[in-house]
Amino acid sequence: MQEVVSYPPATFSWVDLATTNPDAAKQFYTQLFGWTYEDMPVSEDGSMVYTMLKLDGRDVAALSAMPPGMEGIPPHWSSYITVDNLEESIAKAEAAGGTVIMPAMDVMDAGRMVGIQDPTGAVFYLWQSGTHIGAKLVNMPGTLCWNELLSHDVAKAGQFYTDLFGWTVQKDANSDYLMFMNNGRAAAGMMQIQAEWGDMPSNWSVYFAVEDCDTSAAKAAELGGNILNPPSDIPGTGRFALVQDPQGAIFSIIYMPQYDPPPSR
């Protein structure tokens, strides 16, 4: 079990889902990943709810209804990156060519956040933690294990994130896949959007680890999801599939051998 007690700066720490049908989304994801959930009212009248998604009683992700002002935007998963000082990071992001699309705000005593759009159009959130550090479990079946940037300009995006977080960009020796490195450790991936992928905006995507990619993909389809990319091997890494939930949000599932439980003795 990979239980987390803190996140170093410039590390992905949280993901949440904005959806058109929270109740249906709860049913889909709890059945797919074995999550439970806890509804947390975030408005005085109780009309706005932030639902914590849990595995073994620990927070792993969240979901909520699409907020006002986002009408017409399809359901989507959002990625959060931990920083020590939100205001300093905002200034760095703007100096590097980023745009603040959601002003900095306090989330009660949980932390402080801001929405940023990078120069190629991808949106992410900066998170300065208070009582909520982010996901308490990662890198095990049913939890977040990877974040990946799909960009129309990987050179421009690479420069932006290097300037903002001090990441470096490393190319895979056997492919065009790029890795963001944070103090020598893999922080995220990056790929150039190809013309044959259609009209896709630059975006940050999320991967959840599973025990068996084929079984989980079949389960997602049974629950009403759409398998956009069937289970496929990634040489030297594992096996993944691209899934669209019944409301339209897209995410990936991946099996990686290192997440297998140790053999019993």
Image: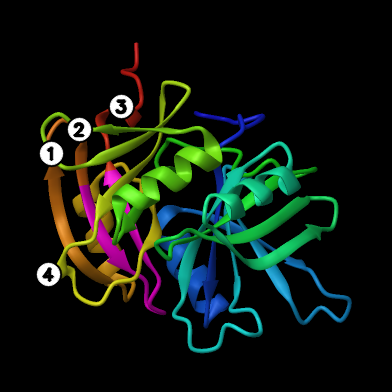
Label annotation for residue 175: 1
Residue identified by numbered label 3: 258
In the image as oriented, which residue stretches furthest toward the bottom?
Answer: 72
Q: Is residue 79 above or below residue 81?
A: below
Residue identified by numbered label 4: 196
Q: Is residue 246 magenta?
A: yes
**Identity, as a three-letter code, of the amino acid under mark 1:** Ser
**Identity, as a three-letter code, of the amino acid under mark 4:** Glu
Crowd class of label 3 (few under 14; some 14 to 19; many from 20; radius 10 Å): few
Residues at circles 3 and 1 in contact by the CB criterion of under 8 Å: no
On screen, residue 103 versus residue 254, left or right, reads right
Residues at circles 1 and 2 in contact by the CB criterion of under 8 Å: yes
Q: Report x, y in % for residue 25.
A: 49, 72
Residue identified by numbered label 2: 172
The magenta stretch is 240-254
The first of marks 3 and 1 along the sequence is 1
**Identity, as a three-letter code, of the amino acid under mark 3:** Gln
The first of marks 1 and 4 along the sequence is 1
Q: Nearer the viewer, mark 3 or mark 1?
A: 1
